[in-house]
Amino acid sequence: MNAWHWISPAKRKRIIKQRYLYLMLVPAFLWSVLFAYGPMVGLYMAFIDYQPTLGKFWSSFFGGKFVGLQWFNLFFAGDEFFLIMRNTLVSSVLSIAIGFVVPIVIAMALNEVRYMAFKRVVQTVSYMPYFISWVIAANIFVTLLSADGLVNELLKLLGLTRDSILFMQEGRYFWGIVAGANTWKDMGYNSIIYLAAIASINPELYEAARVDGAGRVKQAAYITLPMLKPTIVILLILAVGNLLNTGFDQYYLLGNSLNRDYSDVLDTYAFRYGLQNGMFSYASAVGLFKSIVAFLLVLGVNSLARRMKSNSLF
Amino acid sequence: MKRSERVVHWTGNVLLYGFLIALFAVTFFPFWQIFILSINDGTDSLRGGFLLWPREISLESYRTVFANPEIVTSVQVTLLRTLIGVPLSMICIALLAYPLSKRDLVGGRGIGLFFIFTMYFSGGLIPTYMIIKSLGLIDSFLVFLFPGLINIFWMVLVRTYMEQLPRELEESAEMDGAQDIQIFIKVILPVCIPVMATVGLFSAIFHWNAWYDSYIYTYNPDLKTLQAVLVKILNQFQTGDMLSQAQQLANENKKIPVTSESIRMTVTMVATIPIILVYPFLQRFFLKGMLLGAVKN
């Protein structure tokens, strides 16, 4: 019995007819096996004592001693676990809190502008940060926040501080800086979806409100915002699903040895232990912990979003 | 309008335009500041103060940067990976999207899930590094092309676009006895130009901005991309701030117009300018792509 007999003759005929379609899938299939599923198999490293000295990768991989959950226990019991989780969650929640509200405000403000040229200029410039790399963004932030940078000059001019504030050197500023940087980079881009949602609101609603004598503030508060609510709820849920997916670039590039107690998150921690200290198995365990929790979070949140979407239809 | 209404109206407008002008300032001035610092005389910039306009224009930093073989090589590497990587990605993404857009593909749903799953779960940094190493891609130009070959999110955009095409397009070609591959090349691809252009632009931005692969997977200085070089410069700045300041003071006495700071600003500008150049195209295409994706999700 081979698998071919399990398929009905009609389907068999279709598969033969569609053979070229399957052929087209080959490059993507090879890519996914090598670069997406390959590393997933490689996660087995988290359960062995991987010694790179045993020779080639696969022989050390299959030859390594199975140690069960040893690396996970080491991570959970270590002093750094609390610190890493605190930094990951606090900076992430702060980024969501600020980065979520600003795009909504931007979209509602842009919607009120009557001068189209002004609107276009502000909009165009606000997308710009989304398209540059985090390397450029980090360079910009480090420059602006340096001891003699624009921000310190501005604070001194306003008399808010006499001596320069060492933003990048003192860890307690880091979460705010990362949340600000995340917001700065994505706010323009993220406002697009709200602008689209506002554009799809029935103009008759505003017409009726105007007849009833509602001003623009009242229209925004009683029509625009309630009509945006479903979009806001869905996007907020999805953002919470990505709580642990903080991103690697901004933490790695803005972090330094002086602010590490505040800037070290799961990704940078795994990176440092794995690629810089050579503790491959331990770092894989940290990575796997993050991947699993993040995956469950996204999954749970997606089903929640789907349920809310189907509810809002009725 | 009553007087009180007029007051409300005016304060509303002041708040509204004040907010939007602040938004403009917050996004525009960081770039402007970098630009000014890159064209201002390096030692003059050390004097500090508000630099919203160059005090002493000097293109010496640009001359130094473009005379530096490390940076010139890195620009060439970045351009090369973009020129090869973008068409390669576009082809592979379109080849994946087309079969998956067919409702009657046997096993299509399962195959789609097989690819979508990779968006939500990954092996993580270390196993990925190990696989790339075991494939012999360390210190190879191919490491810039293969691991990032396919982006499932962009593939979903293309697939959605293809699903929305009228069935009649393919049916008439099928009547003429055309095979799936012929239909794909002659009928489907030509009408997919807008969405493929969007993917091409996204892919170009990805390649231009990529730093991690070059930073981690290559040691050969001839394989460093511009962004990876910029990371190195940033790291030097972050760790050796005090040291370089002493050096800078020494330079100041010698009246050297270039400082490590002005070099860093200039390389940042060089990395930013291509993005600004493709920006008008981005504006047009990415809005469509973004909204298409939003509808799908």
Image (spheres, rainbow, N blue to C red):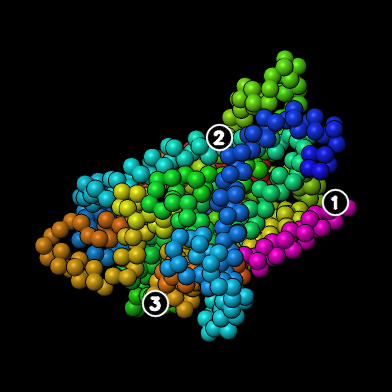
Quarter that holds the N terminus of chain A: top right
Along the line of sight, the residue nearer the viewer: B99 or A10: A10
Is A27 positioned to the left or the right of B214 in the image? right
Q: Which residue is mark 3?
A: A258
Q: Is residue A12 magenta?
A: no
The subunit carrying tag 2 is: B
Can residue B180 be seen here? yes
Q: Quadrant of residue A44?
A: bottom right
Residue A29 drawn at (x, y percent): 62, 43
Q: Which residue is mark 1?
A: A313
Along the line of sight, the residue nearer the viewer: A206 or B8: A206
Residue A42 drawn at (x, y percent): 57, 61
Q: Residue furthest left?
A: B254
Observer-side mark, 2 or 3, equals: 2
Along the line of sight, the residue nearer the viewer: A253 or B258: A253
Q: Which residues are magenta?
A: A290-314
Q: How far apart in space, not on screen, are marks 2 and 3 (Cα)?
A: 45 Å
Q: How far apart in space, not on screen, are marks 1 and 2 (Cα)?
A: 39 Å
Q: Quadrant of residue A139?
A: bottom left
Q: Quadrant of residue A186?
A: bottom right
Can residue A285 be seen here? no
The kind of residue tagged 2 is Ile
The kind of residue tagged 1 is Leu
Q: Main secondary structure of the magenta part?
A: helix
The kind of residue tagged 3 is Leu
Q: Residue furthest right?
A: A314
Q: Which residue is mark 2?
A: B91
Q: How many marks?
A: 3
Residue A248 vertical placement versus B66 (above, below)? below
